[in-house]
C-alpha cells in the first residue's frame, strides 16, 4: 500500500506554501512526500531547494491536474494547497478525484474551490471568508495554522540592545509604505532591516538590506530587536503570516496589524502589540517604547516563544494525523 502524500500546489516562492510543505514532511517523517507544482518552469529555485532539502522532490505539471497524472504517483493521500476548480480537468472533477483521499488546505481565499473529503483553513479569519460554503459545499473542516519547526528558532538569541526593527517581506506594491517603516525606526534612533530596502533608501546608514534564504532565516532574526509586520492598508490582510510565527518562535516581540491571521497570533501587550496599519503615529510610539527598553523587549520576547504551543509541527501532527488516518481507511 502506498504511503505517499502528494502535495499539489501552484506557488513556489521562498516561504509560504513550499515552506509549509517542507515542515509538513518533518511533522510526518514516516511518510513519503512529493511536491507537484502546477506550472512549467519559472519557479523559485530557492523554494524548490528548500523542499528538496526536506526530502520532498518536486515534479512539474504544465497542464491542469487530472486522473492520469495522479495515477502515475499512486498517492495514499492528495493534499491540494490553494487549488481551485480552474486548476483541474473536467467540469466535475470530484467524480474522478474521489478515487483518492483528499484534503484541501486553504492558505488563502481561492474560489471556486473543489469538493474534498476534508478542508483545512490556516486561520479563523480565512474560515470566515468561506462562511457561505460551510455546512453545505464544505462539510468537514478544521482550522490548523501552517505550523513551523519551532525548534529551529528555539536557540535564537535576539539582540534586544541593537535597536534593529526587522521585517522579512517587502511591501512592494506600495512605494510610500517602506518610508513609514523606516520613519518608525528612526524615531527611536534605530535601524530598519528589510529585504529590498536599498531599492527605496539607497545607501542610507540606518537601513540593512539582507535577504534571508531558506537556511538562514534564524540567523537573520537573531540580528533584530523587534519584529514589525504591518503592510500597506491597500494590501489585503494576511491569512496567517508565517514570518510572524517564525519571529515569535525566535523570541522577538511583534508589532503587527490588527487584522487577518496576524491578529490571531499576537496577544496585545503580552507578546507584542496590535496596531491599525493606518496609524503611523502609534506605530512610531510603540517602536520607540520597545527599542528603548531592552528588558521589556526580552520579557515580551519570552512570551512570544509560546507560539510553539499554537503553531509547531507537533500541533499539526496531533490535529491532522487522526484526519489522515480516517481518510486512509476510507472514512469521510
Image (cartoon, helix red, strand yellow):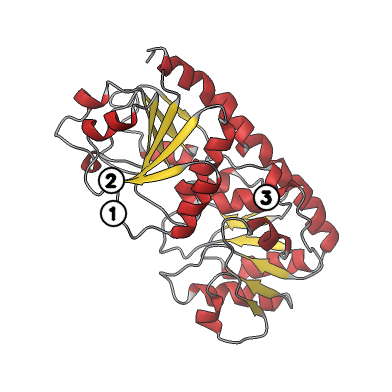
SS at circle 2: loop
Looking at the image, residue 170 lies above or below residue 18:
below
Which quadrant does the N terminus fall into?
top left
**Mark found first going from the N terminus, 3 or 1:** 1
**Image position of 267 (left or right of 97):** right
Is disc 1 in contact with disc 2, using a CB cutoff of under 8 Å? yes
Q: Residue 250 placed where, x, y %? A: 71, 51
How far apart are the two marked residues, 1 and 2, measured between alpha carbons? 6 Å
**Image position of 9 (left or right of 318):** left
Looking at the image, residue 205 lies above or below residue 287:
below
Mark 2 nearby-residue class (10 Å; few <14, some 14–19, many ≥20): some
SS at circle 3: helix
Which quadrant does the C terminus fall into?
top left
Q: Is residue 108 visible?
A: no
Q: Residue 166 placed where, x, y %? A: 64, 66
Question: What residue is disc 2 on?
Answer: 61
Q: What residue lies at 43% left-to-right and 28% top-to-bottom? A: 4
**Mark found first going from the N terminus, 1 or 2:** 1
Q: What residue lies at 27% left-to-right and 22% top-to-bottom? A: 98
How far apart are the two marked residues, 3 and 1, measured between alpha carbons? 36 Å
Mark 3 nearby-residue class (10 Å; few <14, some 14–19, many ≥20): many
The part of the image, by quadrant, that contains residue 41 is: bottom left
- In depth, the one of 167 and 184 nearer the eye is 167
The part of the image, by quadrant, that contains residue 101 is: top left
- In depth, the one of 227 and 64 nearer the eye is 64
Question: What residue is disc 3 on?
Answer: 248
Question: What residue is disc 1 on?
Answer: 40
Q: Residue 204 placed where, x, y %? A: 62, 86
Amino acid at each position: 500500500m502506498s504511503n505517499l502524500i502528494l502535495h499539489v500546489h501552484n506557488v513556489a516562492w521562498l516561504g509560504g506554501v513550499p515552506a509549509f510543505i517542507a515542515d509538513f514532511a518533518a511533522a510526518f517523517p514516516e511518510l513519503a512526500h512529493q511536491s507537484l507544482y502546477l506550472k512549467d518552469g519559472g519557479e523559485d529555485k530557492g523554494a524548490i531547494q528548500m523542499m528538496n532539502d526536506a526530502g520532498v522532490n518536486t515534479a512539474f505539471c504544465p497542464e491542469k491536474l487530472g486522473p492520469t497524472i495522479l495515477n502515475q504517483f499512486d498517492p495514499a493521500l492528495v493534499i491540494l494547497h490553494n487549488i481551485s476548480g480552474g486548476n483541474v480537468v473536467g467540469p466535475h472533477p470530484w467524480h474522478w478525484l474521489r478515487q483518492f483521499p483528499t484534503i484541501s488546505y486553504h492558505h488563502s481565499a481561492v474560489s471556486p474551490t473543489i469538493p474534498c473529503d476534508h478542508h483545512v483553513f490556516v486561520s479563523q479569519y480565512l474560515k470566515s471568508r468561506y462562511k457561505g460554503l460551510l455546512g453545505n459545499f464544505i462539510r468537514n473542516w478544521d482550522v490548523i495554522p501552517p505550523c513551523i519547526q519551532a525548534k529551529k528558532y528555539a536557540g535564537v538569541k535576539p539582540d534586544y540592545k541593537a535597536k534593529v526593527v526587522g521585517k522579512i517581506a517587502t511591501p512592494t506594491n506600495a512605494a510610500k509604505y517602506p518610508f513609514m517603516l523606516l520613519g518608525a525606526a528612526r524615531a527611536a534612533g534605530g535601524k530598519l532591516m528589510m529585504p529590498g530596502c536599498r531599492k527605496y533608501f539607497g545607501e542610507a546608514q540606518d537601513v540593512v538590506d539582507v535577504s534571508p534564504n531558506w537556511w538562514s532565516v534564524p540567523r537573520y532574526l537573531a540580528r533584530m530587536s523587534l519584529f514589525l509586520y504591518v503592510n500597506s492598508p491597500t494590501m489585503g490582510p494576511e491569512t496567517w503570516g508565517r514570518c510572524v510565527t517564525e519571529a515569535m518562535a525566535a523570541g522577538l516581540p511583534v508589532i503587527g496589524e490588527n487584522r487577518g491571521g496576524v491578529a490571531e497570533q499576537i496577544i496585545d501587550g503580552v507578546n507584542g502589540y496590535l496596531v491599525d496599519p493606518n496609524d503611523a503615529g502609534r506605530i512610531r510610539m510603540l517602536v520607540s517604547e520597545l527599542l528603548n527598553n531592552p528588558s521589556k523587549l526580552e520579557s515580551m520576547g519570552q512570551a512570544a516563544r509560546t507560539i510553539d504551543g499554537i503553531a509547531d509541527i507537533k500541533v499539526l501532527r496531533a490535529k491532522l494525523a487522526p484526519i489522515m488516518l480516517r481518510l486512509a481507511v476510507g472514512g469521510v
